[in-house]
Image (cartoon, rainbow, N blue to C red):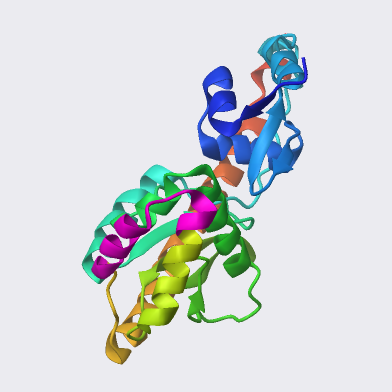
Amino acid sequence: MNELLTTKQVQEMLRVDRTTIYRMLKDGRLQGVKVGSQWRFRTAEINAILHAPSPIPQETAAAEPPPPKSEPSPVACLQAVQDVSAETVGVGAIITDNDGLPISRLSNSYHFCDLIRNTESGQQACVDSWNGLSHQTAVNPKFTTCHAGLQTARARIEVNSVTTSIFVAGQFYTDMPKTAVQQQYIKQLASTHGLNAAALDEAINDIPILSLAKQEKLVEWLKKLAATFSVIGQERSEMIERFHRIISISDLENSPIAS
């Protein structure tokens, strides 16, 4: 059968969310084809995944734990801080990996962006924009126009001197947009993602315009919060490393007592 499945169909078949599908594409566990701006998947391959043999039982796997690595801090530890601070500052916020894939849930999202992200192609366009932010070489945050015509900025989250993720603020303007430019974005977004232009036009009126003073505060907020997330991630990494050391010196299976 050569039928091509949509991302939503694959989500339902594999019982995973959209982000997991993108991660599977990234690490090669899943192969897809692009039809326009949307992913499609062959039915035969999805069926093969569903009917694949069960993984090796845990007891037959290697007993030695994997070495510690640099990784983002646990989402549950950061989400509440992100939610409260994003609402206080009045912008949208999210943590993504270095490829733009979401790690945390988007906080304080405006309806205009929700309309776009509720489509598969819109979600992918946001990921592409976040991916572009992650590859910026500038150390400090700088304002960048996203695919929807709004402003975004990012700060790096580092663990063990390695950038593990990025903290993104977006869904705002730095200047009053020109009507013609704004309408051109709305027309393009409606056409690309199959959206109602009138609904987008109404929703965009809620997007905040940050004064110069608020822009400066936003940059400092981004840097400080990313630094805080980096500290949490560093502490977690060191705790995991200590845990693995304890395991290595407490291997009861190979100790004289256990024999």
Asked whether 225 or 120 is in front, the reply is: 120
Q: Residue at x 66, y 78 (%)?
A: 137
- Magenta stretch, overall SS: helix
Based on the displayed image, in which of its 4 quarters is residue 55 positioned?
Answer: top right
Asked whether 69 or 146 is in front, the reply is: 146
Relative to 211, is 229 above or below?
above
Q: Residue at x 57, y 50 (%)?
A: 124
Q: Is residue 205 magenta?
A: yes
Q: Residue at x 57, y 35 (%)?
A: 20
Residue 165 visible in the displayed image: no
Q: Percent x, y for residue 245?
A: 64, 39
Relative side of 122 to 177, left or right? right
Q: Percent x, y for residue 21?
A: 61, 35
Relative side of 50 to 157, left or right? right
Asked whether 202 or 233 is in front, the reply is: 202
Relative to 113, is 104 above or below?
above
Residue range of the region highlighted in magenta in the rendering: 190-206
Relative side of 168 to 238, left or right? left
Q: Percent x, y for residue 210?
A: 29, 81
Residue 21 visible in the displayed image: yes
View extreme (bottom): residue: 212
Q: Is residue 3 magenta?
A: no
Relative to 49, is 137 above or below?
below
Asked whether 115 or 172 is in front, the reply is: 115
